[in-house]
Amino acid sequence: MSYEVIATLMFSTMMLMLLTGQRVFGAIGFVAVVAALLLWGDNGGHDIGFSAAMKLMKWYPLLTLPMFIFMGYVLSESKIADDLYRMFHVWMGGLRGGLAIGTIGLMVLISAMNGLSVAGMAIGATIALPELLKRGYDKRMVTGVIQAGSSLGILVPPSVVLVLYAMIARQPVGQLWLAGVIPGLMMAALFIAYIAIRCRINPALGPALSAEDRAMPRAEKLRLLRAGLLPLVIFAVMMVPFVNGWTSLVESSAIGALAALVAAIVKGRMTREVFENSVRNTLGITCMFMWIILAALAFGAVFDGLGAVKAIESLFTEQLNLSPWMILILMQLSFILMGTFLDDTAMLVIVAPLYVPLVGALGFDLIWYGILYTITTQIAYMTPPFGYNLFLMRAMAPPEIALRDIYASITPFVLVMVLALALVMIFPGLATWLPGYVYGN
């Protein structure tokens, strides 16, 4: 049996298992282990899974994963993150579309605290969405705002998805996180510009708050400003030492987790329930990602042994005679297609053994490509029929927001994301300048 047939069988078996509802790491790991045993038997097949586990256990930067997740959950469970929205509500409510713009700002800050899309979606749907609807904002626009804004969680550091990519692509996590800063802020700025322009053209979409609604003593406004800026202070305490080279990435993540814990204690919000929920959620998500990474490493090791990467490279460059940029565009289109029925981790694990080495062989920067992958994943999160954020919004939205409203809300924001993706592809420096500057110094 040829290697091409073996690779096809592995992919088809894995996709079949995923379509039956099996867990991602179970389907991928099972195919990897069975293929290794059938191909190499007792002469080395059983070592592949063990070697992947040892590689995972020795990967020191993986310690950042539970630290950042714990920090995000402490700030969320203790309601410190809620103060952010109240700050935006008071200070930006007087603008047309101001609360929607403030929601994007909230999502950027939540992303900088958690690194997961689901955290921003939960906070936006439970805190921001009812307030926006009560203030007369268009329901389709605001559901799109929350879905698009929450997707920034996987691009703005400390992105958990980029940690997974770093492990599979063997790239430094710190450089990937810094590479996501400018594209993430650029995309947030594009969202804000779209909201401001739409609300200026049609004020009914996002009416400004009346003077009565915004009436509040200046002392109270300043108190809300201080409370809302606390998460920013925690983020600065964590990231400034790392950027200046005073601490390692792992040490900075520990500082961030400790700072969030201390802030919750000082504000009197660290109850036994908050601590237990934060630890339990951190443990669950960390273990999930570790299992996925373990399965991905085993699957990739089998593909390396088969030589499938070189076969794919030969097919694209020699037999089909495609240019490197054409191959790259086809990769991005395939990610968007897979995103209609798979989540981000499944997409990365399934195609990373093929795409990442091929991108390097074509001469592209793997740090830059990590940002392209992440932006494409954001688009996939919001594309029907099975976009991840679409179903999260449906589960959390009030009854007056129908599924058709959720689907209709995402079109302009997906177009904005496509524009951001094109800009990063055309101008790679948007992703590569900051890590080059920081690590170059």
Image (spheres, helix red, strand yellow):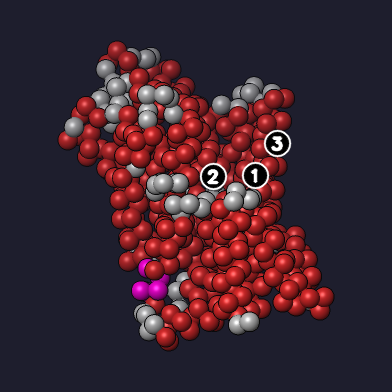
Residue at point 39% right, 48% down?
Answer: 383
- Relative to 405, say whether 117 is above or below: below
What amino acid is at disc 3?
Answer: Arg
Q: Which residue is mark 2?
A: 116
What amino acid is at disc 2?
Answer: Leu
Residue at point 27% right, 17% down?
Answer: 210
Question: Marks 2 and 3, Cα distance to the nearest angstrom?
Answer: 16 Å
For the stretch drawn in magenta, the main secondary structure is helix
Q: Are marks 3 and 1 in contact (CB under 8 Å)?
A: no
Instruction: Give the magenta-colored segment's residue range.
Output: 325-329
Q: Residue furthest bottom?
A: 318
Q: Residues within 10 Å of mark 3 (few under 14, many from 20)?
A: some
Q: Counting residues from the N terminus, which is met first, the one under dot 1 or under dot 2?
A: 2
What amino acid is at disc 1?
Answer: Ile
Q: Which residue is mark 1?
A: 285
Q: Which residue is mark 3?
A: 280
- Relative to 320, say whether 238 is above or below: above
Q: Secondary structure at mark 2?
A: loop
Q: Secondary structure at mark 3?
A: helix
Q: Counting residues from the N terminus, which is met first, the one under dot 3 or under dot 1?
A: 3
Q: Residues within 10 Å of mark 2 (few under 14, many from 20)?
A: many
Q: What is the x, y in percent for residue 318? A: 43, 87
Residue at point 68% right, 42% down?
Answer: 284
* Residue 270 vs residue 195, the one in the foreground: 195
Q: Counting residues from the N terminus, which is met first, the one under dot 2 or under dot 3?
A: 2
Q: What is the x, y in percent for residue 127? A: 46, 26
